[in-house]
Amino acid sequence: MEPAPKGPNAADAQRPSTWRRYKSGMCDGCWAGCCTLPVEASASDLIRLELITEEEAAESLKRVAKRLKSEGYIQAFVPRTQLFVLEQRNGRDCIFLGKDRLCTVYQKRPEVCRKFPTIGPRPGFCPVAKKG
Ligand code: SF4
Ligand code: SF4
Protein backbone atom coordinates (compact mmCIF):
# COMPACT_ATOMS: atom_id res chain seq x y z
CA MET A 1 0.00 0.00 0.00
CA GLU A 2 1.28 3.50 -0.83
CA PRO A 3 2.19 5.59 2.20
CA ALA A 4 -0.47 8.20 2.92
CA PRO A 5 0.65 11.60 1.59
CA LYS A 6 1.70 14.20 4.11
CA GLY A 7 -0.82 16.81 5.07
CA PRO A 8 -3.43 17.35 7.72
CA ASN A 9 -5.05 14.12 8.82
CA ALA A 10 -8.31 13.02 7.31
CA ALA A 11 -10.17 14.12 10.44
CA ASP A 12 -9.34 17.76 9.65
CA ALA A 13 -10.88 17.53 6.19
CA GLN A 14 -13.84 15.79 7.76
CA ARG A 15 -14.28 18.58 10.34
CA PRO A 16 -15.58 21.63 8.44
CA SER A 17 -15.50 23.66 11.68
CA THR A 18 -11.66 23.72 11.33
CA TRP A 19 -11.75 24.99 7.70
CA ARG A 20 -10.63 28.45 6.58
CA ARG A 21 -12.56 30.95 4.49
CA TYR A 22 -11.53 30.62 0.83
CA LYS A 23 -9.61 33.50 -0.73
CA SER A 24 -8.35 33.91 -4.29
CA GLY A 25 -4.88 32.36 -4.77
CA MET A 26 -5.29 30.01 -1.80
CA CYS A 27 -5.02 26.90 -4.01
CA ASP A 28 -1.35 27.66 -4.82
CA GLY A 29 0.67 25.20 -2.73
CA CYS A 30 -2.41 23.74 -1.03
CA TRP A 31 -2.37 19.98 -0.37
CA ALA A 32 -5.79 19.74 -2.12
CA GLY A 33 -7.89 18.99 0.91
CA CYS A 34 -10.97 19.36 -1.28
CA CYS A 35 -9.82 16.28 -3.24
CA THR A 36 -9.97 14.16 -0.06
CA LEU A 37 -13.73 14.61 0.24
CA PRO A 38 -16.07 12.07 -1.42
CA VAL A 39 -16.90 13.28 -4.94
CA GLU A 40 -20.41 12.78 -6.31
CA ALA A 41 -20.35 12.54 -10.09
CA SER A 42 -23.28 12.48 -12.50
CA ALA A 43 -23.57 10.37 -15.64
CA SER A 44 -22.67 13.51 -17.65
CA ASP A 45 -19.50 13.87 -15.58
CA LEU A 46 -18.57 10.25 -16.31
CA ILE A 47 -19.19 10.77 -20.04
CA ARG A 48 -16.91 13.84 -20.02
CA LEU A 49 -14.30 11.80 -18.12
CA GLU A 50 -14.59 9.22 -20.93
CA LEU A 51 -15.36 6.47 -18.42
CA ILE A 52 -18.70 5.69 -20.06
CA THR A 53 -20.48 6.39 -23.35
CA GLU A 54 -23.80 8.20 -23.83
CA GLU A 55 -25.29 4.90 -25.03
CA GLU A 56 -24.26 3.08 -21.85
CA ALA A 57 -25.71 5.87 -19.72
CA ALA A 58 -29.02 5.74 -21.60
CA GLU A 59 -29.21 1.94 -21.28
CA SER A 60 -28.67 1.32 -17.56
CA LEU A 61 -26.88 3.35 -14.90
CA LYS A 62 -26.97 0.33 -12.57
CA ARG A 63 -25.02 -1.68 -15.12
CA VAL A 64 -22.61 1.24 -15.56
CA ALA A 65 -22.14 1.33 -11.77
CA LYS A 66 -21.40 -2.40 -11.62
CA ARG A 67 -18.68 -2.09 -14.29
CA LEU A 68 -17.07 1.05 -12.85
CA LYS A 69 -17.06 -0.48 -9.38
CA SER A 70 -15.32 -3.62 -10.60
CA GLU A 71 -12.78 -1.44 -12.47
CA GLY A 72 -12.10 0.58 -9.31
CA TYR A 73 -13.40 3.97 -10.50
CA ILE A 74 -16.36 4.32 -8.15
CA GLN A 75 -17.14 3.19 -4.61
CA ALA A 76 -20.92 3.59 -4.77
CA PHE A 77 -23.97 4.46 -6.86
CA VAL A 78 -26.99 6.11 -5.25
CA PRO A 79 -30.13 5.14 -7.25
CA ARG A 80 -32.22 7.84 -5.56
CA THR A 81 -29.98 10.70 -6.76
CA GLN A 82 -28.54 8.84 -9.79
CA LEU A 83 -25.08 9.95 -8.61
CA PHE A 84 -21.85 7.95 -8.47
CA VAL A 85 -19.28 8.37 -5.68
CA LEU A 86 -15.72 8.30 -7.04
CA GLU A 87 -13.28 5.83 -5.48
CA GLN A 88 -10.77 7.15 -2.93
CA ARG A 89 -7.22 5.90 -2.24
CA ASN A 90 -6.52 4.96 1.37
CA GLY A 91 -10.11 6.00 2.03
CA ARG A 92 -9.05 9.58 1.43
CA ASP A 93 -7.56 10.87 -1.84
CA CYS A 94 -9.65 10.96 -5.02
CA ILE A 95 -8.42 8.37 -7.53
CA PHE A 96 -7.70 11.19 -9.99
CA LEU A 97 -5.41 13.08 -7.61
CA GLY A 98 -1.78 12.86 -8.77
CA LYS A 99 1.28 12.26 -6.57
CA ASP A 100 2.01 15.99 -6.90
CA ARG A 101 -1.48 16.55 -5.42
CA LEU A 102 -2.78 18.12 -8.62
CA CYS A 103 -5.82 16.82 -10.50
CA THR A 104 -4.84 14.50 -13.38
CA VAL A 105 -8.15 15.09 -15.19
CA TYR A 106 -8.46 18.82 -14.56
CA GLN A 107 -10.05 19.76 -17.92
CA LYS A 108 -12.59 16.95 -17.57
CA ARG A 109 -13.20 17.09 -13.80
CA PRO A 110 -16.75 16.70 -12.39
CA GLU A 111 -19.05 19.69 -11.87
CA VAL A 112 -18.81 19.54 -8.06
CA CYS A 113 -15.01 19.95 -8.31
CA ARG A 114 -15.50 23.03 -10.52
CA LYS A 115 -17.90 24.56 -7.99
CA PHE A 116 -15.96 23.85 -4.76
CA PRO A 117 -15.90 25.65 -2.32
CA THR A 118 -19.00 27.56 -3.49
CA ILE A 119 -20.74 24.27 -2.81
CA GLY A 120 -19.54 21.65 -0.34
CA PRO A 121 -19.90 20.67 3.31
CA ARG A 122 -19.21 24.30 4.38
CA PRO A 123 -19.82 26.68 1.45
CA GLY A 124 -17.10 29.33 1.13
CA PHE A 125 -14.65 27.44 3.39
CA CYS A 126 -11.75 25.04 2.65
CA PRO A 127 -9.76 22.25 4.33
CA VAL A 128 -6.65 24.15 3.21
CA ALA A 129 -3.10 23.31 4.31
CA LYS A 130 0.36 23.54 2.74
CA LYS A 131 1.67 20.58 0.72
CA GLY A 132 3.87 18.37 2.93
S1 SF4 B 1 -8.93 22.91 -0.39
FE1 SF4 B 1 -9.53 24.97 -1.14
S2 SF4 B 1 -7.57 26.06 -1.25
FE2 SF4 B 1 -7.09 23.87 -1.19
S3 SF4 B 1 -6.96 23.26 -3.37
FE3 SF4 B 1 -9.07 22.86 -2.66
S4 SF4 B 1 -10.21 24.71 -3.26
FE4 SF4 B 1 -8.02 25.24 -3.30
S1 SF4 C 1 -11.57 14.82 -9.99
FE1 SF4 C 1 -9.76 16.10 -9.75
S2 SF4 C 1 -10.50 18.01 -8.82
FE2 SF4 C 1 -12.08 16.45 -8.51
S3 SF4 C 1 -11.64 15.56 -6.49
FE3 SF4 C 1 -10.65 14.27 -8.04
S4 SF4 C 1 -8.55 15.06 -8.15
FE4 SF4 C 1 -9.81 16.64 -7.16
Image: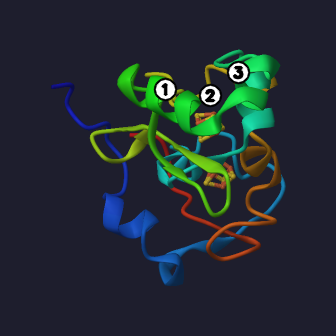
The amino acid at mark 3 is Glu
112, 44: nearer the viewer: 44
In which quadrant is the C terminus drawn? top left
Q: Which residue is mark 3?
A: 56
104, 12: nearer the viewer: 104
SS for tag 1? helix
Q: Mark 1–mark 3 contact, CB under 8 Å?
A: no
Relative vertical location of residue 128 with respect to residue 105 in this rendering, above or below: below
Task: Compute the Cα span from label 3 to label 2.
Answer: 26 Å
Q: Which residue is mark 1?
A: 68
Could you tell me if residue 41 is visible in this image?
yes
* Residue 64 relative to residue 58: left or right: left
**Label 2 CB sits under 8 Å from any ligand 2 atom:** yes
20, 115: nearer the viewer: 115
Residue 38 is situated, as x and y percent measured from the top left of the image, at 50, 53
Mark 2, Cα crowd under 10 Å, few <14 / some 14-19 / many 20+, is some
- Residue shown at the point (43%, 38%) measured from the top left: 87
Could you tell me if residue 109 is visible in this image?
no
- Residue shown at the point (51%, 84%) measured from the top left: 17
* Residue 15 relative to residue 28: left or right: left
Quarter of the image for residue 70 reads: top left
Which mark sits nearer the N-terminus, 3 or 2? Answer: 3
Task: Compute the Cα span from label 1 to label 3.
Answer: 12 Å
